[in-house]
Each structure stands twice: as C-alpha cells, then as structure tokens.
Image (tube, helix red, strand yellow):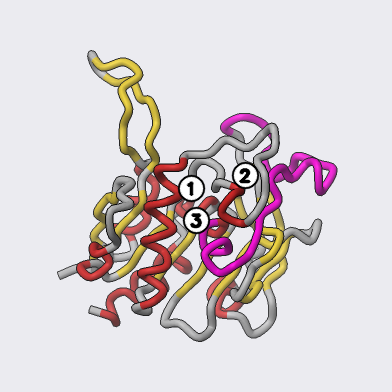
Amino acid sequence: MRPVIGITTYVESATWGVWTDLPTALIPQDYVAAVNAAGGRAVLLPPDDLDADVVGVLDGLLLSGGADVGPELYGAEAGPRTVTRPERDSGELMLARAALAIDLPVLGVCRGIQLLAVAAGGALHQHLPDVLGHERHQPAPATYGRQDVSFVAGSRLSGLMGDDRGVHCYHHQGVADAGSLTVAARAGDGLIEAVEDPGKRFVLGVQWHPEVVRDKRIFGAFVEAASGRR
C-alpha cells in the first residue's frame, strides 16, 4: 500500500457547474499530483478542530498553502492586509502539533511553513513589502515570483536541492522567527525561505511552491520518510 499523505484543504467560496459561490473544501490539484508522482496516496483533510486523531492513520502530513495565519496565534494584532481563515488555523495547528508529537513526517508549503513556525513558538511578518521594501515574493495576482535562495550548509534541504537555487513563490507574509525550528534557506533579501527540525524523522517547511513543478527531490524525500514510518 502506498503511504497515505493527508493534505490540509482550503475553505473558500467556489463556483462550478450549476453551483455558485458555494462554501467548499478544496485544494489545487498540483498538491495531489506531486504526492502521487512521488509514490504517495493523497487524502484530503478539511478543517476540523474537534480532535487530531486522524494523524494515527496517516503516514505523512502536508500543510498546504492558503490564507494568512491568524496573528493572535503568535501574540500580534492583525494588520490591514492580513486575511485569515480561523477555521483552518485551529484545526491545522492541532494537526501539526499532534503530528510533531508522534514524529509523523511533515511537509509545510507556503502557509504551511508559517504554520510550522507558529507551532514551534515563532512569529511572522504580516506584509513583506512593509518590511523588505519590494513585492518580488508576490509580484502580481496569480503570478509566481522567481527567487534564488541560499541553502544552509549541512541542512537536510541543502542535501536534497544541490546547486539548483531557483524557486517559485507567491506570498505576502513570511517567517520572522522560526521558533525552535532550524533555518535551512534564505532568499537574497534575507527572508527565511525554509525551516526544518533535524531531530525529527522528516519536518520541512518551504516558503515556495515545489508542488507546481512536481519537485521530486522534496516530495520524494517526504514520501520516502512516510514510507519508512509505514
């Protein structure tokens, strides 16, 4: 049996067929395709803050992208450009902490790295242009920014990525403090682009979107770790 990878879902108003603006639990197919291409079996996890028992039947947890993490979770007040989904925050933070507690392999993408940082006691920048003075991490609506990142020597991520430093990103928030996690990569402007936990089987958060290019280095290592757990 392929390792079962739970993917957290967005909750947004969606329109298809005869349905218009219907509240919907959904995920871009890129996440599912990247998991499948790496040898995993994707299952979707809609927001649920009643318990985190589902981690007991998963082999890995993928924290997907989406809306901003609520700043109250890291002791800050919401800025004017912060748009949150509280139902995601409460359920996913519970999932992340439960997964980390049992050493379940975890991959965080975009919002996912930010959630991992918050779960580890860290904090976020709420609007990067206010901090960095540019918009290269999110140049235009639905347009990925192209960044060259620097990997920290000796990190798990450095071993996976080799000399390929180019990534595709789309975010207006970022990790300001990684908490108990280890910084594994930074952008040219100094922004944290990846975090990991060397003491765990596999805990990696990346600020970019490896699912879009089906990056088998990252997804392959993630699914391989999940396979080992099974």
Residues drawn in magenta: 115-142
SS type, badge 1: loop
134 magenta-colored: yes
Q: Position of residue 38 (x, y in %)?
A: 34, 64
Residue at 27%, 50% (x, y): give it. Answer: 44
Q: Any mark on residue 65, and which?
A: 1
Q: What amino acid does circle 3 point to?
A: Gly
What crowding class fits label 2: few (fewer than 14 Cα within 10 Å), some (14-19), or many (20 or more)? many
86 vs 177: above or below: above
Cβ atoms under marks 3 and 1 closer than 8 Å:
yes
Q: Any mark on residue 171, and which?
A: 2
Residue at 55%, 48% (x, y): give it. Answer: 69
Rendered-image quadrant of the C terminus: bottom left
What crowding class fits label 3: few (fewer than 14 Cα within 10 Å), some (14-19), or many (20 or more)? many
Q: CA distance from mark 2 to mark 3?
A: 11 Å
Q: Position of residue 13 (x, y in %)?
A: 38, 25
Rendered-image quadrant of the N terminus: bottom left
Q: Any mark on residue 112, and which?
A: 3
In the image, taking residue 70 as reference, residue 30 lies left or right, namely left
Whichever of labels 2 and 1 marks the residue nearer the N terminus, that label is 1
Cβ atoms under marks 2 and 1 closer than 8 Å:
yes
Whichever of labels 3 and 1 marks the residue nearer the N terminus, that label is 1
Q: Any mark on residue 193, and which?
A: none
Q: Position of residue 98 (x, y in %)?
A: 36, 69
186 vs 126: above or below: below
Q: CA distance from mark 3 to mark 1?
A: 6 Å
Residue at 23%, 70% (x, y): give it. Answer: 56
Residue at 53%, 83% (x, y): give it. Answer: 198
